[in-house]
Image: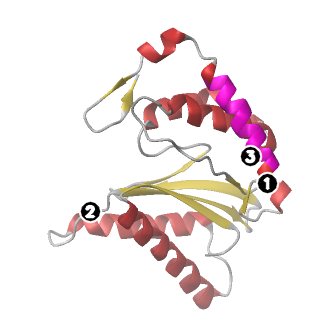
């Protein structure tokens, strides 16, 4: 995979590994054929086509994973975020969530107005969203890992430096802990584990 891309997957781990492997194959194949890095949109569309093919034939099991692809498009000099769903749907987003707690995470993302913030400014807010959506009584503990693709990282996918990550996690955890007690009662969970508001 090229350093100008990063990806996140949600769903069945074996399917997620297969999607990551396919993304790497698509990147290297495009580079070999066209002598340049694949644009994020093309990668997302190729992955969506791959996901969709598994829904068309009776002898293939549909994928149980979604993939988010973030990348820097050198043609437009813009960063892009794309998500491919197991159905084969693909869309570009400013902020996206997949997996358990998607609905409430999307609501928090919309409230956060991340498009008006730099990556550094958004880190504590993103940590807050993740801590807010996580229900300690029902969910397993999680380790927060963050990667960024921004001017600060020279438009290369890189792990957020440790001191920034720990500051963001501390601020996000404190902000999530200070949410009103009535906010938790408005959240309910449906049969497959999604949280409905």
Tell which of 161 and 20 is nearer to you. Answer: 161
Chain-order first, disc 3 or disc 2: 2
Q: Secondary structure at mark 3?
A: helix
Is 168 inside the magenta-drawn segment? yes
The number of numbered badges drawn on the structure is 3
Q: Secondary structure at mark 2?
A: loop
Callout 1 touching callout 3 (CB < 8 Å): yes
Magenta span: predominant SS is helix
Q: Secondary structure at mark 1?
A: loop
Q: CA distance from mark 3 to mark 2?
A: 35 Å
The residue depicted at 60 percent of the width and 42 percent of the height is 95
Residue carrying label 3 = 165
Residue range highlighted in magenta = 163-176
Residue 122: which disc?
none
Q: Badge 3: how crowded within 10 Å, few (<14), some, or many (20+)? A: many
Residue carrying label 1 = 161
Residue carrying label 2 = 62
């Amino acid at each position: 995979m090229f350093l100008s891309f990063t990806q996140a997957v949600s769903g069945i781990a074996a399917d997620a590994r297969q999607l990551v492997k396919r993304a790497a194959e698509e990147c290297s194949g495009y580079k070999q054929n066209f002598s340049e890095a694949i644009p994020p949109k093309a990668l997302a569309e190729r992955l969506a086509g791959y996901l969709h093919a598994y829904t068309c034939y009776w002898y293939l099991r549909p994928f149980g994973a979604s993939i988010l692809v973030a990348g820097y498009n050198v043609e437009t000099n813009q960063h892009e975020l794309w998500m491919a769903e197991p159905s084969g749907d693909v869309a570009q987003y400013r902020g996206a969530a997949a997996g358990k707690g998607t609905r409430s995470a999307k609501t928090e993302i919309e409230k956060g107005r991340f498009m008006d913030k730099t990556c550094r400014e958004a880190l504590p807010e993103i940590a807050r969203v993740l801590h807010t959506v996580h229900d300690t009584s029902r969910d397993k503990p999680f380790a927060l890992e963050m990667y960024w693709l921004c001017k600060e990282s020279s438009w290369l996918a890189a792990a957020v430096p440790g001191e920034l990550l720990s500051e963001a996690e501390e601020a996000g955890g404190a902000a999530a802990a200070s949410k009103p007690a009535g906010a938790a009662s408005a959240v309910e969970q449906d049969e497959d584990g999604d949280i409905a508001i």
